[in-house]
Structure formats: structure tokens, C-alpha cells
Image: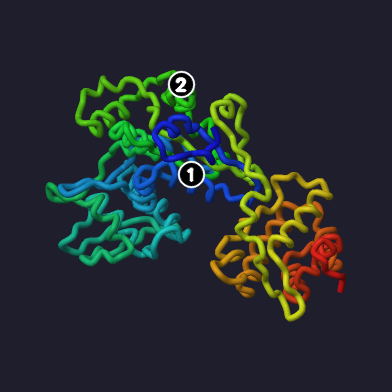
Amino acid sequence: MSVNQVHQSTEERENVTHNHILFGAPGTGKSFTLNKNLEVLLGDDKDTHYERVTFHPDYSYAHFVGTYKPVMVGKSSSQPLDEEVLRVVSILKDTKDAKTKYEELYKLFEAGEFEDGLWRIPLLVGIAMGKADNDKESKVTVKNKNGEDSKSTVEINHGKAISKYVQFVSDQPENTSNIAYEYVPGPFMRVYVKALKNPSKPHVLVIEEINRANVAAVFGDIFQLLDRNDEGASVYPIQTSEDIKQYLAKELYGRNPEAYKTLCIPKNMYIWATMNSADQGVFPMDTAFKRRWDFTYLDIDNGEEQIAGKYVQLSESQKIEWNKLRKAINQFLIEEKINEDKLLGPYFLSKNIVAPEGKDINREDFIRVFKNKVLMYLFEDAARQKRQTLFAGCGGKALQYSAICKAFDEKGVHIFHDSIKAAMGLSSL
């Protein structure tokens, strides 16, 4: 059953596909369709019973499922450290000598990755090495970039540049904040726990742009759980690691960790995703992974009725309908043997731009976004090998993006090939 056929009744919910991917060309309304399906499936729980994550090339199993991370802990609460603090503190707490710590920190601060604090690095190193404290002045000797000894005076005021690091490397009284390692769950584990705690309600993990990450690496052994039985539960369990056992025991009413030796996706947990096969930065999915999903293709004109009849006045003599322009460009791309997944969907431009409620398109907004999104996409991606043909109205400057934008300001849609203008009922200039 397609996700588009989701209904609110419990009986029909049981037939909804649990692992589902919506795919299509850019602007076909994949996220919009998925959000509508969420509203129907979850009803009043739509704001609390799903979590959304966007995959990217650096996304990993640790991000997706969870891993041990440094956290700031104290008598009140604990929270993960941001990457900036973690990198600085890791250098300060390492068993390196003062000179090495100084040089590594200097590189980080000099590169502009952190707040301006180059001149306070000796103080920070001194505190970390126990050669400076918070209640008196002292001097720390380090090597400068020329290899010469340099003395810096330690002062009471640490300043904004380093104060956020000092608390983790200086001697502290008991019960104050410090660093510890704690299991931090990823979106998969968070939704999994919610589904187990509330088995009578559906819970959805939404993955945007699923093929922008290496899914085999991201899912890891979770891949095996995607095989579902008729009710929607995993057919084949996987063994859980010790950290996941402890986490589940803590979250699920303090039971014995050994009760969670295996992991199975429950029938009330759904994994829905979107996929843009036209994206240049994608990872291929192997057949075994694809076989565990149901795919729904959204065709190139999906949802076009929502933007029908919306016009924009490009100039005093040029009024166009976005849908008509989009289709004319698509027809040119098809005739030039461009793949269908490179075509322009109705929502390639935001609905707020092309179909504002109760009024025509705003001219200035449309022109700005059209240049920044449509022209850039055609120039850099869809028509990369057909630039001179597509932008025939630009003369010999069709290979320069800046020249194309300038020509659009002057000529509007007359920058395009004659066949596009003819399809729109426009004559050549």
C-alpha cells in the first residue's frame, strides 16, 4: 500500500508500509507529501511522535544509532560538549609538553576556527599544566613561533576567549561541572525507545536525503532489522552492544540490562525517507538495501495543480506563468536527452514564491530566486553540457554564469533557446 493511501483508522494503519522511500526529481514535493502523510498517520501526535534527520556525506553509524561522547556533567545536569570545546580541551588534557600544546592550540586559533584568543594561549596552557591558577599572577614559559623562549603573565581575568575552556582543565571543587563520557543516543535509538514505551501509538523516523550518506555504513547491523514480518516487526534480531544494553535498561524502567541482549524494530516504528536521485553528491544503494524498502516515485508534474495559473510580470511587456515556463524548459531538456530526474518539478521553487495564497507571484522575489536557484541549477547541473544551446539568447556568453544572470535582467526568458520561447507562445526578440 502506498504511503499516499494512509488513513487514520487503526485497521488501515496496520497495512501502511513501514520502510518507505519517496523519490523523484527536484521540486516534486517529496518532503511536502511526506509531511502530509505524517499528519494523517499520527493525527494529534504529529508533533511528538516523529523525529526528522537529514543525511549528509559525513553522517555515520555513531550519529544515527548513538555512541559514547564527552559530556559536561555536574550536580544539576549533563549535556554533550560542542565540537569546539572538545577539540581544545582534548589538546589541553593530553600528555604532551607545554610547547606542543601551545603550538597545536596556536594553529587552531590562528586558523580562525575559534574566538580570538591567540595572546591568551600561554595562560590557558599554564592553567592546564598546573603552572597558573585563578587567584594570583604567574608566568608561563613557552616557545614562540621562532623557537625562542617567551614568558607570558597570567592574570585573574581569563577573558571571553578562553573562559569556556578553563572550567574543564583547572582544579575545581567537588560537585561542579566536569567532563565525563556518556552514551548519547542518535535519532534511530531515540525513536526506538519512544516506540517501545508507547506500543499502541505509531512512531516515525523521517530521513531526508537518505542517499546523500553511505547508507551501508550508517545503518550497519541495523540493516538486518529492516526485514519486517506481516505485522511490521523485525524478523531477524541483532545482538546489542554493552553500551546499548545499559542505555535501554536505564530508559526502559530500570530493568536488567541482560533483558536487552537483542534488538528488534517494533511494529509501531516506521522509517520513512526521501531521496533525490539527481543529486550529484549521492552514494549508490546496493540491491540488498533497496530490497528492504518500498519506493514511491513522484512524477515530474506531481502537485502541479497547486501552482496552476500563477503569473509573474518580468517586465512591462513580459508576463509568464511559472508552470508553463517550467514545462517548456523540461521539454527542451528531454529533447536534449537529459535524464528525467534532472527536470524541474512544480516546487523546485518554494510554494511561497510561486503560489502565494490569494495573489500572483511577487515579481522581485521570483526574479531573485529564479536566478539563484533555477539558472544556477541549469548552469551547474542539469544542462551543464548543453549551456550554449539552452542559453542561446545570451550569444557567446553562455559559458559565464554572471553573464547569464545579467542577460536575464535585460531580456527575461529570451535568454533561452527559441524552442522554449515558442513553447510558451513567445516570439524571438
User: Is residue 165 shown to the viewer in this render?
Assistant: yes
Q: How is the image coloured?
A: rainbow
Q: Is residue 423 above or below residue 302?
A: below
Q: Position of residue 43 (x, y in %)?
A: 39, 45
Q: Residue at x 82, y 65 (%)?
A: 421
Circle 2: residue type: Asn
Rate crowding at label 2 as few (under 14), some (14 to 19) or many (20 or more) other CA atoms within 10 Å: few
Q: Secondary structure at mark 2?
A: loop
Name the foreground residue: 391 vs 412: 412
Q: Residue at x 84, y 67 (%)?
A: 393
On-image quarter of the C terminus: bottom right
| Mark closer to the observer (2, 1) | 1
In which quarter of the view is residue 63 placed?
Answer: top left
Does residue 419 appear left or right of residue 56 in this picture? right
On-image quarter of the N terminus: top right
Q: Are the residues at dot 2 and dot 1 in contact (C-beta closer than 8 Å)?
A: no
